[in-house]
Amino acid sequence: MRSPADYLERARTETDSSALRQLARCPYPFVWQALAANPHTPPAALLELSAARDSSWNDNRLLRLLAGHPRADRTVLKAVLDATAAKLAAGERPYAVVLALAAREEIEADEVTPLGDLRGASARLRGLLARRLRPVSR
């Protein structure tokens, strides 16, 4: 029988895609976050993690890690965007996720901009989002 610490260690060090996908189904949010930080985690596992829920703090941290993951493809990022929109609409404040999504080339500015109009968005978030999405002038 494996302990939670064993799952965490595997999530941090595993490189096999199949094993990482299996770990994504474990019930521990700290393992989900370790998987989302592991650069070897495949997009299929990242997509599964985008639907994982535990608590507001853990969920927001997980979504932020997924939004910045180097292997997160458009499908994963769109799932993170949708989850973030739901959190904002419910009055939560996953601001770091919004800004991380705005930095991704796979997501269009017109997909991220509406997040600033949702219930949980602050004026400060809208300003940061506008600056992040502003084209760089040279």
Image (spheres, rainbow, N blue to C red):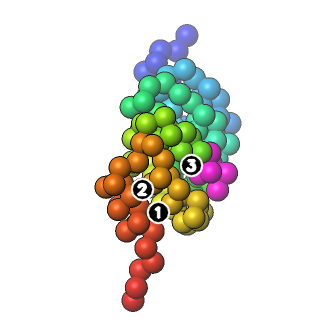
Q: How many numbered circles are shown? A: 3
Residue at image mark 1: 103
Magenta stretch: residue 93 in it? no
Residue at image mark 2: 99
User: At 62% from the left edge and 26% from the top edge, which residue is drawn?
Assistant: 25
Q: Nearer the viewer, mark 1 or mark 3?
A: 3
What type is the residue that disc 3 sits on? Leu
Image coordinates for residue 42, horizontal then vertical, percent: 63, 46
If the image is split into quadrants, where does the N terminus sit?
A: top right
Identify the disc placed on residue 61: none
Q: Tag 2's secondary structure?
A: helix
Residue at image mark 3: 81
User: Image quadrant of residue 46?
Assistant: top right
Image coordinates for residue 38, horizontal then vertical, percent: 49, 43
Compare marks 1 and 3 and give the one earlier in the sequence.
3
Label 1 and label 2: CA atoms lie apart by 6 Å
Q: Main secondary structure of the magenta part?
A: helix
If the image is split into quadrants, where does the C terminus sit?
A: bottom left
What type is the residue that disc 1 sits on? Ala
Q: Tag 3's secondary structure?
A: helix
| Residues at marks 1 and 2 touching, judged by CB atoms closer than 8 Å | yes
Compare marks 3 and 2 and give the one earlier in the sequence.
3
User: At 49% from the left edge and 34% from the top edge, which residue is drawn?
Assistant: 90
Q: Residues within 10 Å of mark 2 (few under 14, many from 20)?
A: many
Q: Is residue 47 left or right of residue 14?
A: right
Q: Tag 1's secondary structure?
A: loop
Image coordinates for residue 85, horizontal then vertical, percent: 54, 44
In this view, the residue in front, 127 or 41, is: 127
The magenta region covers 74-79
What type is the residue that disc 2 sits on? Leu
**Does residue 36 show up?**
no
